Amino acid sequence: MGPWSRVRVAKCQMLVTCFFILLLGLSVATMVTLTYFGAHFAVIRRASLEKNPYQAVHQWAFSAGLSLVGLLTLGAVLSAAATVREAQGLMAGGFLCFSLAFCAQVQVVFWRLRSPTQVEDAMLDTYDLVYEQAMKGTSHVRRQELAAIQDMFLCCGKRSPFSRLGSTEADLCQGQEVAREDCLQGIRSFLRIHQQVASSLTSIGLALTVSALLLSSFLWFAIRSGCSLDRKGKYILAPRSPGQKSRWAQWVPC
C-alpha cells in the first residue's frame, strides 16, 4: 500500500471514528442528564440536610460529565471538518480536544480505582442521616423525605447490625412494605448497574480517543506534507534552467 493509499484509508477511518465519538458523546450526555435529573439521584440530592454528603459528589460528577461531552463533541467535529477540508489548524484543534478528553478519562479511571465506593458511601451516608433524624425527631418534613426515598428505591428501613434505631422500624415498615428489601442494599444494587454502564462508556471512550489521537496526528503530518485524497502528489516549482525565461511546475508524488 502506497503513501497515498494509507492517507486515504486513514481519512476514512477518521470519519468513522468521529461518527462513533459523536455517538459516545450523545450516550455520555444522556447518562449525565439522567444522573442529574433522574428521580433516584434527585430524591437523595434534595434531602434538606444541613450538610448533604452527596451534593458535592453529585455536582462534581455532573460538571466532569459535561466537560467530557464538550471535549468529545468538539474534537469529533473539528477532526471531521479537518479531514474533509484538509485543514491543518482544525486537525490540530481536534487533536488538542482529544488529548484533553483522554486525560479526563484517565483521571476518572484513576479516581474509580482509588475511591471505588465514594459515590455509594455518599448516598448511603445521606440516607443514614435522613433515616436517623426521621426516627429520632418529630419533623414531618424529614419523615416525608424518608418516605420519598423508600418509595423511589422500593425499599424500607435498614437492617444494619450497627443501627441504634432498630426498635422503631416496626412503625416505619407496615403492610406490604415489610416485604421490601433493605434500603442500604437497594441503593447499592441501583448504583452497581449505574456504575457498570459508566465503566463501559469510559472503556469505549478511551479506545476511541486513542484511535482518534493516532489518526489525527498521522493526518496532520500528511496534510502538512501536501498529500491529498484527491491527488497522488503535488506540484512544485522546478529550478530555472539556463536559457529559460520562466520556471515550470514539476509533479512530485507523495
Image (cartoon, helix red, strand yellow):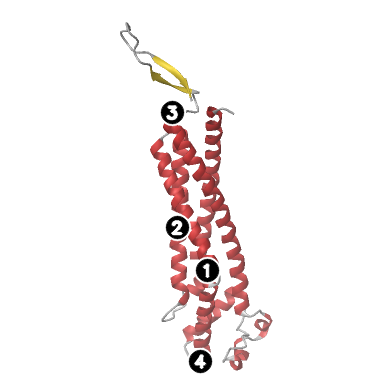
Q: Is residue 164 shown above or below 222?
A: below
Of the residues under marks 3 and 4, which one precedes in the sequence?
A: 4
Q: Nearer the viewer, mark 1 or mark 4?
A: 1
Q: Secondary structure at mark 2?
A: helix
Number of numbered discs: 4
Q: Amino acid at mark 3?
A: Gly
Crowding at dot 3, Cα within 10 Å, few <14 / some 14-19 / many 20+, comes out as: some
Q: Position of residue 214 (x, y in %)?
A: 51, 43
Q: Is residue 154 visible?
A: no
Q: Secondary structure at mark 1?
A: helix
* Label ID, residue 226: 3
Q: Position of residue 26 (x, y in %)?
A: 52, 52
Marks 1 and 4 close (CB-CB < 8 Å) = no
* Label ID, residue 114: 1
Asked if residue 144 lies left or right of residue 175, the reply is left
Task: Name which quarter of the figure residue 248 lies in.
Answer: top left
Q: Amino acid at mark 4?
A: Lys
What residue is shown with label 2? 66
